[in-house]
Amino acid sequence: MWLYLALAVLLYFVIRSYRERQQVDNLREKYVFITGCDSGFGNQLARQLDAQGLRVLAACLTQKGAQELERLTSDRLKTTLLDVTSTESIEAATIWVKECVGNKGLWGLVNNAGIAYPVSPNEWLTKEDYIKVLNVNLIGLIDVTLHMLPLVKKARGRVVNMSSIVGRLSTMGGGYCPSKYGVEAFSDSLRREIHPFGVSVAIIEPGYFRTSMTDIPKNLEILEQQWIKVPEEIKESYGRPYFDAFYEMFKYNLATRCCTDLYMVTDCMQHALISKYPHTRYSAGWDSRWIFIPLSYLPTSIIDFVLTRSAPKPAQAL
Ligand SMILES: NC(=O)c1ccc[n+]([C@@H]2O[C@H](COP(=O)([O-])OP(=O)(O)OC[C@H]3O[C@@H](n4cnc5c(N)ncnc54)[C@H](OP(=O)(O)O)[C@@H]3O)[C@@H](O)[C@H]2O)c1
């Protein structure tokens, strides 16, 4: 009996691994549009897909980022400038993509652009701080998707949306976690609606990775600036020792938690784009797969305990 069971398990993994490696045909004729290609995952994915022979349409926020990417890639890869917070900019990018893809349509739309700061206890922030992050990570992503969707439907292609483990488990204050929860919600409803048109939607949920978003000096500088702006009454309720402890904890987490192997994420994005059997969700990174996603299924009281057990205590805590 045990032998049959072992053989069945083995067979399952062999079939699964075979399925995982099946790719769609004609990669060289497939167009993929990626936002936020100046740096980080977007930049690496653009170079990776270009090397695979796909036709990459890379959107950068800056001219410098676009020029640098063009320098490192083949003539197939084309760049444009895109600020996802501007509808005019998205409209211009959509016209450009339409011209590039002709009647083939757009095989892949990768919504990758994002920002994280400011990250701090919620009470230290203003409405504008939230709007800034939500505008890029959520509203920008939705706006780009709504503009590009007819082109993706034409190709019966794929939408790949960059979320995060913090779209499953809110670990910090600021607009970043709400923006990623929003990405999850938008992607889930879109997937169900768009499936009848032959379009798939994949959600990427990376853990912590070393990119310019997790740059330590930049994050710490923004945290310090944020503290200066906190109203006196709120400052008193937390106290300077709280800020110092929070600062050190933030610094320690950024320094020790970030994985440097960005391929763990871009390989998932690539799979979502070119596999015959793309997944709905990709847990990218060890921390995502083995800590944060499993933790997100536990009762809230346990999650709260785990996430707050080593947090500093505010001066006026009861
Ligand atoms: N790093 C992580 O640990 C981590 C974990 C989970 C999820 N993510 C997600 O992964 C995605 C990529 O981030 P990353 O880690 O690769 O960081 P990154 O290197 O900072 O990349 C973000 C990219 O978005 C661009 N961007 C910023 N604002 C934009 C705007 N308004 N319009 C268009 N592009 C804009 C940036 O351009 P500039 O470089 O010119 O500013 C940059 O190219 C983000 O959605 C992020 O939330 C990151």
Image (spheres, rainbow, N blue to C red):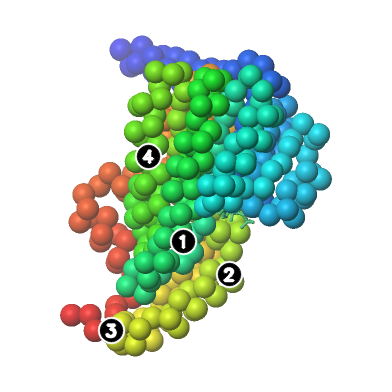
The residue that disc 3 covers is 237
Label 1 CB, ligand 1: below 8 Å? Answer: no
Q: Residue at x 51, y 36 (%)?
A: 147
Of marks 1 and 3, which one's residue comes earlier in the chain? 1
Q: Nearer the viewer, mark 4 or mark 2?
A: 4
* Residue 186 image label: 4
Crowding around mark 1 (Cα neighbors within 10 Å: few <14, some 14 to 19, many 20+) is some
Residue 227 falls left or right of residue 313 = right
Of marks 4 and 1, which one's residue comes earlier in the chain? 1
* Residue 132 image label: 1
The residue that disc 2 covers is 218
Q: Is residue 232 visible?
A: yes
Q: Residue at x 34, y 33 (%)?
A: 189
Q: Nearer the viewer, mark 1 or mark 3?
A: 1
The residue closer to the viewer here, 247 or 35, is: 35
**Separation (CA) of disc 1 from disc 3:** 26 Å
Q: Nearer the viewer, mark 4 or mark 3?
A: 4
Quarter of the image for residue 187 reads: top left
Instruction: Give yes or no for contact between labels 3 and 2 (Cβ–Cβ under 8 Å).
Output: no
Of marks 3 and 2, which one's residue comes earlier in the chain? 2
Quarter of the image that includes the C terminus: bottom left
Location of residue 19 in the rendering, given as x and y in whole percent from the top left corner: 51, 18
Quarter of the image that includes the N terminus: top left
